Image (cartoon, rainbow, N blue to C red):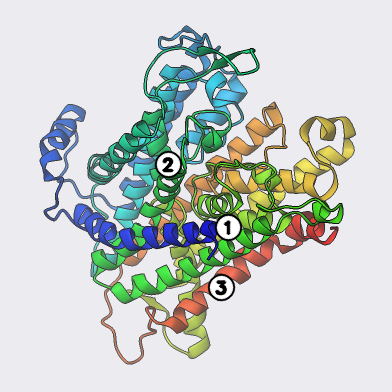
Amino acid sequence: MNSEILGTVLQIALMVGLSYPLGRYIAKVYKGEKNGFDFMAPVERWFYKFCGIDPQEEMGWKKFLIVLLTLNLFWFFWGMVLLVFQGHLPLNPDGNPGQSPDLAFNTCISFMVNCNLQHYSGESGLSYFTQLFVIMLFQFVTAATGMAAFAGMLKGMAGKTTRNLGNFWVYLVKSVTRILMPLSLLVGFILILQGTPMGFDGKMELTTLEGAEQSISQGPTAAVVPIKQLGTNGGGYFGVNSSHPLENPTFLTNIVECWSILILPMAMVFALGFYLKRKKLAYSIFGVMLFAYLAGVVTSTYFEMNGNPEIDRVGIAQQYGSMEGKETRLGSAATALWGMTTTVTSNGSVNGMHDSTMPLSGMMQMLNMQINCWFGGVGVGFMNYYTFIIIAVFISGLMVGRTPEFLGKKVEAREMKIAVIVALLHPFVILVGTALASWLAARNPELAGAWLNNPSFHGLSEMLYEYTSAAANNGSGFEGLADNTPFWNISTGFVLILSRYLPIVGQIAIVGLLASKKYIPESAGTLKTDTATFAFMTFAVIVIIAALAFFPALTLGPIAEYLSF
């Protein structure tokens, strides 16, 4: 077997193998059972006391959401102030200026919603202070917010008849102290040992082999990179993200970082099974997600390792596949795996240029984000999948003449309306945003020339990818697009807000409404939702609703580009 392919297989096996025990541990944390990090309890109690939080308080779904949204509103104002005035704040040895209001708005919203869509270059757009007290802080808080929402859903689904989803603050704090922080320290130590910098010095001035002077940015990189991956945040400490040799120095760090992106979203599915004591349900959900993920990995790896047919036509050998926009120390297969891993989650970090991938690889990257529920972000990935479960339960019940029920609760018109709105919101904001940008570009050729690095089909793909990435809380980009403009900063900012908070509100509301209903024990007439048949039904619903909505746009972009070869 080719060594690159073998490396891909081993990485995926490592992710799947370790996600099972981690999922069991996560379920114990959220259920309040004894676990290996109980020694953090005094720290957690001090935090509750300092902030005036009653950890014993039970919250209904409405209060749960109010606390979640209020916290995020506070962090928005915090981030805006620090980003605009970062030029006057400490820990800025390179003298980086403050961001413009529209760029600060986009940056703050982007990191607050766990997207990390960057319209700036990391080493020149931020100071060490804002890297730590805006970016890294938000990467912990926003990841923990998604995990807390997931934990609240677990509580609601597990209860027979209840109006309580648990305590948002407890879930938030435990997500940081007992899951994100320990894993981040582990990954951070590995990165430091492999050469990732961790300090507060300014740029290094070096003389290259050619005798030229070069300034090398450094800083507290090893502190930021682990949580950006583990929290499915993305966002590069350096402008070129994880293709930078200081952010991702060796093939070992590439494996560790790629593993970090997907391990928690995978583990969350198993945590569902352990928490609800329904392992078969978790296995069926995991199977659907893994199948879709592997289909993307196989497709992308095939096209990237086979090279560009246009180069073949001129007789140039492509021994290592399509290497444009990729790191030679990593190879085309590792970049293909990373591209699929980062887009089936809401991570968005890159170790190569997505803009340079083959057309169908780029299509698969977009399709992963457009479907937005194959593992997904920490916590919110299953929440998006849950929306389609509700729709699939309702449709299946009508098809077989059985009452639509999920986990002993009747799914009725109110839950269905919310689920359909949430499912259709995602394609709506992406396609409307892309249509508006395309219309503006068509009416003003100078504007199109300023925005787009590529014409025709690929230019459309750049704009479609940008809104797809924003709506999926992903953050990666077809970086041929010149996106640091008021139009892109503001328009994607609103897409980020709508696509993060409306789905969370809808999904928590569905769980809260179902949890308060009378529990109905399973009987011979109950529709089984933990079978292969229902898993296939859910997959079909996802493909029909999520994927086919984007097929016309994909046909005009990456598919047309592929057929033009």
The answer to whether residue 483 of the structure is visible from this angle is yes
Q: Nearer the viewer, residue 372 or 391?
A: 372
Q: CA distance from mark 3 to mark 2?
A: 38 Å
Q: Answer with mark 1 or mark 2, whichever residue precedes in sequence.
A: 2
Query: Residue 408 lies in what quarter of the image?
Result: bottom left
- Local crowd size for mark 2, using a 10 Å CA cut-off: few (<14), some (14–19), many (≥20): many
Asked whether residue 62 appears in the rendered view, the answer is no
Q: Is residue 506 above or below residue 410?
A: above
- Amino acid at the residue labelled 1: Asn
Q: In the structure shown, which secondary structural element does the residue marked by tag 2 occupy?
A: helix
| N-terminal label among 3 and 1 | 1
The image position of residue 505, as x and y in percent, is 44, 51
Where does the image place residue 231, in percent across and percent down from the top left?
Answer: 39, 43
Q: Indicate left or right for 145 with 112 as reference.
A: left
Residue 180's disc is none
Q: Is residue 303 above or below residue 322?
A: below
State how far apart marks 3 and 1 are (Cα): 15 Å
Which one is in front in this view, the residue at disc 3 or the one at disc 1? Answer: 1
Of residues 526 and 272, which is closer to you in this image?
Answer: 272
Task: Give the residue at mark 2.
Answer: 253
Name the residue at 27% across, 55% down.
165
Query: On residue 541, which mark appears?
Result: 3
Query: Residue at label 1?
Result: 368
Identify the mark nearer the N-term, 3 or 2. Answer: 2
Q: Residue 124: give x, y in percent of width and height.
A: 56, 19
Q: Secondary structure at mark 3?
A: helix
